Amino acid sequence: MLDYFINAFATLFVTIDPVGLAPMFLAVTAGMTQADRRRVAIRATITAAGILLIFYASGQTVLNVLGISVSAFRVAGGILLFLIAIEMIFGKRQERKAETAEKAIDSEAHHGTVNELAIFPLAIPLISGPATISAIILLSSQAPDPITYAGLGGVIAVILLSCLGAFLLADKLERLLGETAQLVITRLLGVLLAALSVQFVADGILAFVQP
């Protein structure tokens, strides 16, 4: 059970990357007051929590309705996470996130509001993007018993709280870490995610070939 929780925490933490979201939050909320930033941070976290809760609670049902086996989803989810890991290792993911943030800033300059920024791009897709949703469905399908499944919900809550903390402390985190430290951390996390994703694919293939 402990191995499962460590694996779940590592997968979700690396996939969502709360520390890496801090600069994106600062870019999106540039020019806002501290009070407005706080409202955006809280609203974005709550929105993302609601989205992830839906897939946490109904992920297995969705797979059953679509006729997708857990093994197939492990392979597909592992490949998707591996692509995310490649982006992180070669520095492409931050560029893509920065582009999303820039688009949101341009949109906000014309007709955006605090609510819109909280939903896009913060809640979707920066926190609850396709990779995160895939990881949650994958992890929930691997839970061996109800207690472990409930514990996964606790892990998700901890990760979301870390996102909220990263948003609220974004300016301090950026000054503390610096650009070089952020690049090093992102690449190390990318290597870790690559290894985890390969394990997901290997488990899925093994389940296919076993009688």
Image (cartoon, rainbow, N blue to C red):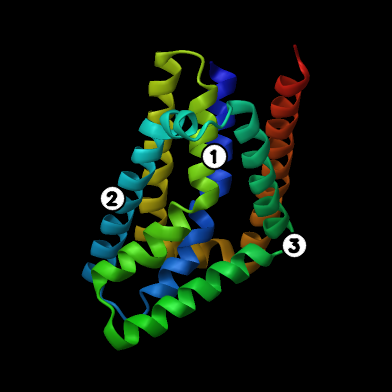
Task: State the SS at label 1.
Answer: helix
Task: Name which residue lies at 37% across and 37% down.
Answer: 157
Real-space CA distance between mark 3 and mark 1, rounded to the nearest whole angstrom: 21 Å
Q: Which residue is mark 3?
A: 90
Q: Is residue 78 visible?
A: yes
How far separated are the C-alphas under marks 1 and 2? Answer: 19 Å
Q: Amino acid at mark 2?
A: Ile
- Label 2 secondary element: helix
Residue that numbered label 2 is attached to: 46
Q: Give the image location of residue 109, x and y in percent.
A: 33, 86
In the rendered image, the vertical position of residue 46 relative to residue 23, given as above or below = above
Relative vertical location of residue 72 with respect to residue 148 in this rendering, above or below: below
Say which of marks 1 and 2 sits in front.
Answer: 1
Q: Is residue 58 left or right of residue 100?
A: left
Q: What kind of residue is marked 1?
A: Ala
Q: Residue at x 54, y 67 (%)?
A: 97
Q: How many numbered circles does the render carry? A: 3
Mark sitting earlier along the chain (3/2)? 2
N-term-proximal mark, 1 vs 2: 2
Say what secondary structure mark 3 lies in.
Answer: loop
Q: What residue is pinned by disc 1?
A: 135
- Between 156 and 137, the residue placed more toward the observer is 137
For residue 121, side relative to residue 113 (left or right): right
Residue contact at pointers 3 and 1, CB within 8 angstroms: no
Foreground of the two, 74 or 158:
74
